[in-house]
Image (spheres, rainbow, N blue to C red):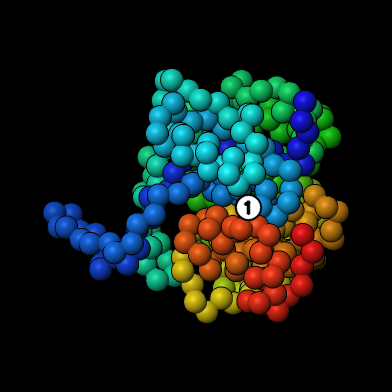
Amino acid sequence: MQRFDVTAIGELNVDLIMGGIESFPEVGKEKYAHRMLLTLGSSTAIFAANTAALGTSTAFAGMIGRDTFGGVVKDSLRRQGVDTCFVVESERTTTGVTVVMNYADDRANLTYPGAMDELRLKDLDPTLFDRTRHIHLSSLFMQAGLSLDLDALFEKAMEKGMTLSLDTQWDPSEQWNFDLRKYLPMIDLFMPNQTELIAMTHTHSLDEAIRYIIPFIKHAAVIKCGAQGSLLVLNDGRTIPAPAYTNRQVVDTVGAGDSFNAGFIHAFIRGCDLEECQRLGNLMGALNTTAAGGTGAFSPKETISQRIYDLFGEQIDL
């Protein structure tokens, strides 16, 4: 059976991206969008596609419906080089969809979760834990079923000697019910953005949030800070900032954080030091903004290194 460097476990859906929107939608009124794209969506899928594009052997474990959108998801993952052997096709539910409304350098999302809420640990192929080196889990708050199985999932990964990364993403309910004290010691790389970390720790500033998590960090946390770059937080309390790479002609920001994760994990799996992982993460997050959709900037993959050099003057070896 094939083995993988990374298996991404999580939500699967399509993104229907609207751009060139005249003004924000209002109840009872019709508005125009002048651009539209139907593409692979979901944070975890974008991460997986872009990790594979960088040359990391990547599989996906998740659930879709047996429907048109499910076909788009599966075909898109395969075209990007992601193995779909662990993807479950369900008759009892439908594939999710996110409508993305782009406004300059920000966006508003509306999601129908569908199958992503249904996935449980028991649905996954148990050989997954013998066939991969690293698990990446994302969009935890949008996966009600899998959230119930975190203890078993994390314990299984640790038992098999796997490394684990987590990017919880935004909590649509804004309840932020995630036990950091319990779970951070199980997670090798914790990868929130600064807004999510502040909300999750129920603090009022990034400094406060970092002080809260330091005692529980297993290996490192890396915090995405948008236009300010990223901040690496080590388990000894040291913090290492890295400035963002600026793309002055942003097409959209869909998947920029997921692309940061892809760059970071790609370097981590190759044994790079954490500061090099952080640099590659920042570069991939910036590259993401040069094309529409979360994966557009990573195709064709043979040109990624050259485009990074042309855009940002940085040499990378993929």
Instruction: Please state if 304 lies on the left or on the right of 316 as rendered.
Output: left
Number of numbered labels in the structure image:
1
Looking at the rendering, which quadrant does residue 156 occupy?
top right
Residue at 58%, 30% (x, y): give it: 87
Q: Quadrant of the C terminus?
A: bottom right
Residue position for label 1: 50
Disc 1, SS = helix
For residue 7, above or below residue 93: below
Q: Horizontal and vertical percent for residue 24?
A: 27, 64
Q: Is residue 239 visible?
A: no
Residue at 55%, 26% (x, y): give it: 88
Instruction: Please state if 302 lies on the left or on the right of 246 as rendered.
Output: right
For residue 200, above or below residue 250: above
Residue at 57%, 68% (x, y): give it: 226
Residue closer to the observer: 59 or 207: 59
Residue closer to the observer: 286 or 106: 286
For residue 299, above or below residue 152: below
Local crowd size for mark 1, using a 10 Å CA cut-off: few (<14), some (14–19), many (≥20): many
Residue closer to the observer: 229 or 221: 229
Residue at the left extreme of this rendering: 28
Q: Horizontal and vertical percent for residue 28?
A: 13, 54
Q: Is residue 54 visible?
A: yes
Looking at the rendering, which quadrant does residue 36 occupy?
bottom left
| Amino acid type, mark 1 | Asn
